[in-house]
Image (cartoon, grey):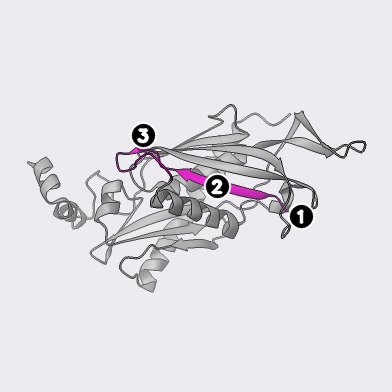
Amino acid sequence: MAAGYKTAEPLEYHRSFLKENCRPDGRELSEFRTTTLNIGSISTACGSALVKVGNTTVICGIKAELANPTVEAPGKGYIVPNVDLPPLCSTRFRPGPPGEQAQAASQFVADVIESAEIIQTEDLCIDRGKLCWVLYCDLMCLDYDGNVLDACVIALLAALKDTQLPEVTISSETCAPVVNTEKKHRLHIHKHPVSVSFCVFDDSIMVVDPTVEEESLSTAQLTVVMDEEQRLCALHKPGGTPLSGEKLQECISKATTRQREIQALIDRVTCSVKPVK
């Protein structure tokens, strides 16, 4: 009977739980799903991480290549993120070029990288105006059950912390780069941003870490990105009903707490890895 009600009236089905301050999956309105993290999942990558937020699963692989710095920033390297939402993760996605949601997710991750200053891109420069590192950050969703942005940011941050780059010097004789794969160093992570997504129901009820069903039924969505210094790095709200200042401050407070939890998780996992020789 309940399954039929859920299918026929999905919004009313969810409202029946929300008015009791809980959700269909048993969580409280402000409760996150279980989050797990593994690093080093891709042996061929310079760094990688696999993140699960509930059923939503995202894997991130970092590939480093030598390139010429841009004319506008001769003393910097650069980072290129790409989010892939393939058909294997959900029937809502189709084969072919990246869809609108995948493109929006890639842009969101790029904005977080820039605004939060996860890495000082000057650290990626090898020879000013001549040689730098470019980090290609490929994020693929393996299972989509809502809140893919939060999973992407966690996966990206963990993969960057796992990344090792070989030592590169410039030959005095040939002026060509010499790569020493026997000697590597880890990236210096400058900031640790964490994103927290919310959904709004009936213009007033807010839930955190929404499932795909909650996303589809909500009247508004909001993603807040905070770092360890309690700095608001990004605020993403793709339309929907407006939020009061009080509601926004509540979201920022929850995001601040979540940032500490996720950074502790990433630190715990990365500290268990053997140090670079």
**89 to the left or right of 5:** right
Residue carrying label 3: 88
In this rendering, is residue 184 above or below 207? above
Residue carrying label 2: 81
Q: Judging from the image, what secondary structure is the residue with disc 1 in?
A: loop
**112 to the left or right of 274:** left
Residue 140 marker: none
Furthest residue in direction left, as rendered: 1
Crowd class of label 2 (few under 14; some 14 to 19; many from 20; radius 10 Å): many
**Rendering coords of residue 55 (x, y %):** 35, 38
Q: Looking at the image, is mark 2 or mark 1 earlier in the sequence? A: 1
Residue carrying label 1: 75
Q: Judging from the image, what secondary structure is the residue with disc 2 in?
A: strand
The residue nearer to you, when weighing 136 against 214, is 136
**43 to the left or right of 84:** right
Crowd class of label 3 (few under 14; some 14 to 19; many from 20; radius 10 Å): some
**Rendering coords of residue 254 (x, y %):** 42, 58
In this rendering, is residue 256 above or below 64? below
Furthest residue in direction bottom, as rendered: 245
Q: What residue type is labelled 1?
A: Gly
Q: Can residue 133 be seen in this view?
A: yes
**Rendering coords of residue 25 (x, y %):** 25, 43
Q: Looking at the image, is mark 2 or mark 3 earlier in the sequence? A: 2
